[in-house]
Image: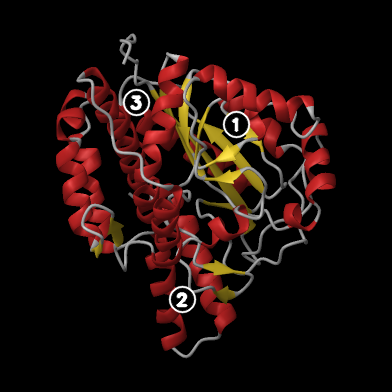
Amino acid sequence: MPLVKKPSFSVGVEEEYLLVDRETRDLISEAPSQMFAECEALLEGQVAPEFLQCQIEVGTRPFSTIQEVRADLAHLRATVAGVAEKYGLGLIAASTHPFAQSGAQKHTCRARYNSLAHDLQEVARRLMISGMHVHVGIDDNDLRVDLMSQTAYVLPHLLALSTSSPFWQGRETGLMSYRVAVWDEMPRTGLPERFSSFSEYQRHIAVLVNAGVIEDATMLWWDARVSARYPTLEMRISDVCTRLDDAICIASLYRCWLRMLYRLRVANQRWREYASLLINENRWRAHRYGLDKGLIDFGRGDIVPYDKLLDEMLALIREDAEALDCVAEVEHAHDIVRRGTSAHRQLREYHAVLAEGKTPEDAMKSVVDMLIEETVHGL
């Protein structure tokens, strides 16, 4: 394999939030006209509207340390939540709302979003979901494409740690990340394709662009993709994490995994690329069960409990976590496994309120209150 310049491994995080009415706890249908302008004035290019007006996106700046990312993301969450509160709104970092009904929300009036709404029809009307995207700086084009295919193996492991969408339209779905079910209705989603080089990747994109199917590579929505805007490899499979430290943990794990893959390349080795058939089975298990039922170890040909897989993953990336000064951040994954993800906490809250004799509506509202509190104050 040809040598390439060592990547910067800079890191940045984008998060999408849902906006709820503090009285009804339901998603808003239309955002207050001045709210986004106030956020933009305070955050200077780090906040953006999303497809639906009940959504808002923030993005940290790229940093060399995960501690800087954490501080920036905490600031972004607190600032947007503070502005939203002025308008009687709450901010929730969860990938679905517990009881909002799809189709009641208005999409943001922008040319790109208008085109998506026209093209995707009912699929677009169901997109009241939020995610988290992690960008890691990989400066060499061919290396980005190479690592994109190799990193597919670990994507279900990251999804399982992030689940925050067990409810949909007032129902307990039985899935820990229902967001994935909604998202997979979109075209050009799922595991990343494999290419032998950046030029091969570009040739395939050109076919779709020239056919008028997509405007550019930003309309590829794979679970991991070569960013069309930055020299980064972007992870997109995870739900948005309600607690800040969970988000930082997952960003750190992804970053360390890429550094580990780069180390293999320098040693003239590479991670084994498994068939999408196998990885998709783990993707389904993470989507359905989260952490609870384990994932398949392809080498053993058996389902292994998640905590055992986590131990193996942390051992593989220990050197990288030390080099990137994020040992505590990646080891936080043990805490997530022990106490559960946001999806677990939402389900516990819902059933605890029902056990008190209250109505399902009361229980759903209590889940929203918990999410509002944890989004800004939960660690």
Disc on res. 68: 3
Placement of the N terminus among the 4 image quadrants: top left
Disc 2 secondary structure class: helix
Task: Give amino acid for label 1.
Answer: Val
First-in-chain label (1 vs 2): 1
Disc on res. 350: 2
Residue 290 makes an appearance in the image: yes
Q: Which one is in front, 341 or 150? A: 150
Indicate whether 255 appears above or below 15.
Answer: above
Disc 1 secondary structure class: strand
The picture quadrant where one finds residue 277 is bottom left
Kindly identify the residue that appears in the image at 41 percent across and 47 percent down. Answer: 275
Residue 228 makes an appearance in the image: no
First-in-chain label (1 vs 3): 1
Disc 3 secondary structure class: helix
Indicate whether 26 appears above or below 188.
Answer: below
Task: Give amino acid for label 2.
Answer: Tyr
Task: Give amino acid for label 3.
Answer: Glu
First-in-chain label (3 vs 2): 3
Kindly identify the residue that appears in the image at 56 percent across and 82 percent down. Answer: 360
Disc 1/disc 2 C-alpha distance (Å): 31 Å
Kindly identify the residue that appears in the image at 34 percent across and 10 percent down. Answer: 4
The picture quadrant where one finds residue 86 is top right
The crowd level at tag 1 (other Cα within 10 Å; few <14, some 14-19, many 20+) is many
Residue under pointer 1? 47
Q: Is residue 297 left or right of residue 79?
A: left
Q: Is residue 250 left or right of residue 313?
A: right
Q: Which one is in front, 39 or 228? A: 228
Kindly identify the residue that appears in the image at 78 percent across and 49 percent down. Answer: 120
Q: Which one is in front, 366 or 56? A: 56
Q: Residue furthest bottom?
A: 357
In the rendered structure, are the residues bearing label 3 and label 2 in contact, judged by CB atoms less than 8 Å apart?
A: no
